[in-house]
Amino acid sequence: MNAQTRTIRALTARDALRQVRVEMGEDAVILSNRRVGDHVEIVAAAPAALAQLEQGGKNEEKENVSQLVKEIRRLQSDLQGKLVSMATPTVHATKKGKIQRSMVRMGFSSALTEQILDQMPEQAGLSWVTQVLERNLRSLRGDEVIVGGGGVFALVGPTGVGKTTTIAKLAARAVVRYGANRVGLVTTDSYRVGAHEQLRVYGRILGVPVHTVKDGADLKTTLNGLRDKHLVLVDTMGMGQRDGRVQEQNDQLDTLGVRRLLLLNATCNLHTLEDVVRVYRTPNVLGCIPTKLDEALAMGGVLDVAIRHRLPLCYVANGQRVPEDLREANLMALLQATFNSLEMVGYNITLPLEFSLENGGMSHA
């Protein structure tokens, strides 16, 4: 490489062009560009190089040399335009960047965010994103499938996620519809005195006896004795997702064919929620119930794992009151609340409604 050409490397095309202009002037000729690892490499020539080329050669070759210079100039202009286009973010790219940062703040994973935004049409915005998210979330009508359909359901999840309170809320719904004599309550949490005592308090209020079991054989016997009940709800022992007893509990409930609802703490970060779903999820887990919505800043993490694990949302719990603070999951309402929650913590994000969902999305057939 002679003294009148330079090789410039930078992290972005914009930075490389800026460096070319600073070191070689506005009229520098871009001879080539390529990506080298994480950098952009540009080979540029000083304007004097072309001037020499125009004047060089024998007299009879000058015309051919002039044509060559013109072609180089044209190619250089085209290349310069492409580089400037690469270096200057478009309105669409800027809009996507803002949405991406907002979604990550809400707790969504980078992988899911990028997968959605890669498909976003230029004219679309946040409204399109929320509609794509809604299309890919699943819901299960809890009042129809659980309270109305009846059967045996165990509520599972880590300690402190709200299983006992949620069971009381579900039992209250069933008692109102079918009567106390058609509802059964069972607890397998004999380790914590406070846990089954709390459920017994709720049981007395509802007029429903609470049965305490110690092991799998005891649970089987108890469930056989409650076969005449329309709905039986089982309160399981709260265990951290890394506790080896979780797998034992999964096996025990699977052996008895007990369907489960997984409770997810909406205040937890994405990595914790991912770990919980990975450990507690089995084919007998029908769906999930996000809890503690009243304490969470955003629902992004819960919605993210629900989408990626194709885990239907049955209810959402947003407080301790029984039975008021439990409602069936309204997907769009949850998304609206998640995006609007950023305003409350100073992110100033709103939902423009002028865009509609176009083809694509990422729905799973």
Image (spheres, helix red, strand yellow):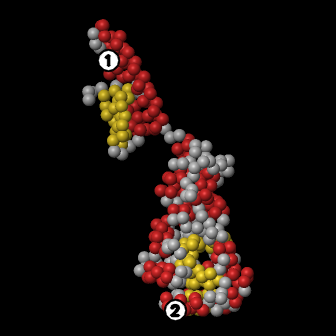
Q: Give whichever of 315, 318 is nearer the camera.
A: 315
The answer to whether residue 129 shows anywhere in this view is: yes
In the rendered image, the vertical position of residue 37 relative to residue 205, given as above or below: above
What's the residue at 62%, 81% (across, down)? Answer: 151
Where residue 146 appears, as percent x and y from the top left, is 64, 76
What's the residue at 57%, 75% (across, down)? Answer: 261
Left or right of 264 in this view: 148: right
Classed neighbour count for the residue bearing mark 1: other residues with Cα under 10 Å, few (<14), some (14–19), many (≥20): some
Where residue 194 appears, as percent x and y from the top left, is 55, 89
Where residue 249 appears, as percent x and y from the top left, is 47, 82
Residue type, label 1: Leu
The quadrant where residue 223 appears: bottom right
Residue type, label 2: Asp
In the rendered image, the vertical position of residue 137 relative to residue 276, given as above or below: above
Task: Tell me if label 2 and label 1 are in contact, CB under 8 Å.
Answer: no
The quadrant where residue 182 appears: bottom right
Q: Which mark is residue 218?
A: 2
Where residue 288 appears, as percent x and y from the top left, is 57, 71
Q: Quadrant of the N terminus?
A: top left
Quick one: SS at disc 2?
Answer: helix
Dot 2 or dot 1, earlier in sequence: 1
Q: Which mark is residue 53?
A: 1
The residue at the far top in this view is 60
Q: Quadrant of the C terminus?
A: bottom right
The residue at the far left in this view is 2
C-alpha distance separating marks 2 and 1 = 95 Å
